[in-house]
Amino acid sequence: MSTLENSALWPFAKYAAELSPDDLPAEALHAAKRCLLDWFAAALPGTVIEPATLLTAAFQDCIGRGGARLYPSGETTDARTAAFINGAASHTVEFDDIYRNALYHPGVPVISAALAIAQARGVSGARLLTGIIAGYEVSNRLGAAANPAHYEFWHTTGTIGTFGAAAAAANILGLTPEQSLHALANAGTLAAGLQQAFRADAMAKPLHGAHAAERGVTVALAAEQGVTGAPDILEGPRGFGNAMCLNGLAEEQPDWAKAATTLGQDYLIKQTTTKNHSACGHVHAAVDSVLLLAREHNLTPADVKKISVGSYQKAEEICGNTNPQTAFEAKFSLVYCCAAALLWGSVRMAAFTPDRLQDPAVRDLMTRISLTTDPECQGNFPALRSAKVEIETTDGRIVSHYAPTRKGDPDAPLSDMELEDKYRDLATAVLGADGAESLLAAIWSIDTLDSARDLVPAPAQAAQ
């Protein structure tokens, strides 16, 4: 056995390199189409706001060359620039997908990278889907193995996402297993993303996804030309496992070999969570519960004396802001999102406008909502993202609900129709109704497209 085959990365590299469209069952392909559709739903509203607009201006000298596309304009650029800008856009409005066992948003780095390199090389839609699946299967397993200890300081989307982007790009480029290993090895040493970035009102969190997508494309292109990496970057004494996956919470580094055992046997992409609310995933179970109780008991804000929420520790740690001042902060404020749910019946884009952020009614309701760590919810984390909500009414009633999971999780998935409704809600404002529908049709039929470059809304396609 060669040194490369002894690497913990070898089974992941071999899988990424050898996965073929002919290998894939229909349910995995359908799941990949759903992920692609959901990626566009999250990315399109992010393309027309900061930081994506600022990044497009910053990289203006890269626009107009290459075969990869920016959205919504359809303008061309090189693969790395497209991966970076589209990666940032897809991680901005907090509507991106989740693989909950890995505490990870796989679509942001994987699809941003896969789409960029597929369009740059002009490969088919079927090859694009195969690359997406390769990226999800590799990174979801690595992320689940690394966590929850890794998540104590690191943002999985920025770190593990680099491996996922590299795997997707390696598959689409047709790299050999050896080349793919070198791409993944260099992804490991370039992986980054500190959680402090989303403890502040900054644009840094979307840059994690951008960086992961762009680095994945870069290391795959480099490996194609012969650039090598350290094969033991995962398991080595100064490698990813020891440096980034212990954090005082784990006694030994992850079991990377165990993580690889089900590659090709089970498709984790089918277990993707699709967000139903435009906020951090840690608030969703509580928001779902508030909406359900309000609907079942016909509650309005005037009926509520107080709302008590119990959830897992990371929900309180990350989403415990009780006085958010910006849209970004509000998306990470459980009390704001629950108040918005009761007041407006929805926690989508409209809930985070400047007027609504400062609405006296929502501010008053927030003072009646509390969040604590519940032992049962904490014990079930990260496998379940649960919440317990108790509402005490002004007339003395107490109503409660336990949400063991979130609407959109694998055990309570959005239907294809519900996913399409989410997409239309987010895409139509950017593309117009006709553009949104033409892109929707192209996504569902992506496996029939001769070139991934054709994955653009009708107006942009006509402009080319």
Image (tube, grey):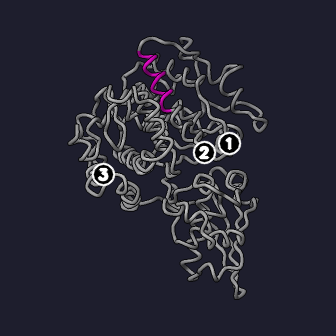
Please name the residue shown 58% across and 73% down the image.
342
Give yes or no for contact between labels 3 and 1 (Cβ–Cβ under 8 Å): no
Q: Callout 2, which amino acid?
A: Leu
Question: Which residue position holds label 3?
Answer: 440
Q: Is residue 5 above or below residue 345?
A: above
Q: Which image quadrant: the N terminus?
A: top right
What residue did someone put label 1 on? 148
Q: Residue at x 44, y 34 (%)?
A: 57
x and y percentages locating residue 454 in the rendered image: 25, 38
Instruction: Name the secondary structure under disc 1.
Output: loop
SS under mark 2 = loop
- The answer to whether 63 appears left or right of 393 in the picture is left
Q: Earlier in the sequence, mark 2 or mark 1?
A: 2
Q: Which residue is mark 2?
A: 103
Above or below: residue 22 compared with residue 305: above
Residue 438 in picture, x, y percent from top left: 25, 51
**Picture coordinates of residue 134 (x, y %)?**
44, 34
Three-letter amino acid code of the residue under disc 1: Pro
C-alpha gap between disc 3 and disc 1: 36 Å
Residue drawn at (59%, 63%), measured in percent from left and top?
A: 357
Predominant secondary structure, magenta span: helix
Quadrant in which the C terminus is drawn: top left
Residues packed near mark 1 inside 10 Å, few (<14), some (14 to 19) or many (20 plus): many
**CA distance for labels 2 and 1:** 8 Å
Q: Is 283 placed left or right of 458 in the picture?
A: right
The mark closer to the camera, 3 or 1, is 3
Magenta residues span 213-224
Q: Amino acid at mark 3?
A: Leu
For the residues bearing labels 2 and 1, Cβ distance under 8 angstroms: yes
Q: Pick the residue in front: 237 or 450.
A: 450
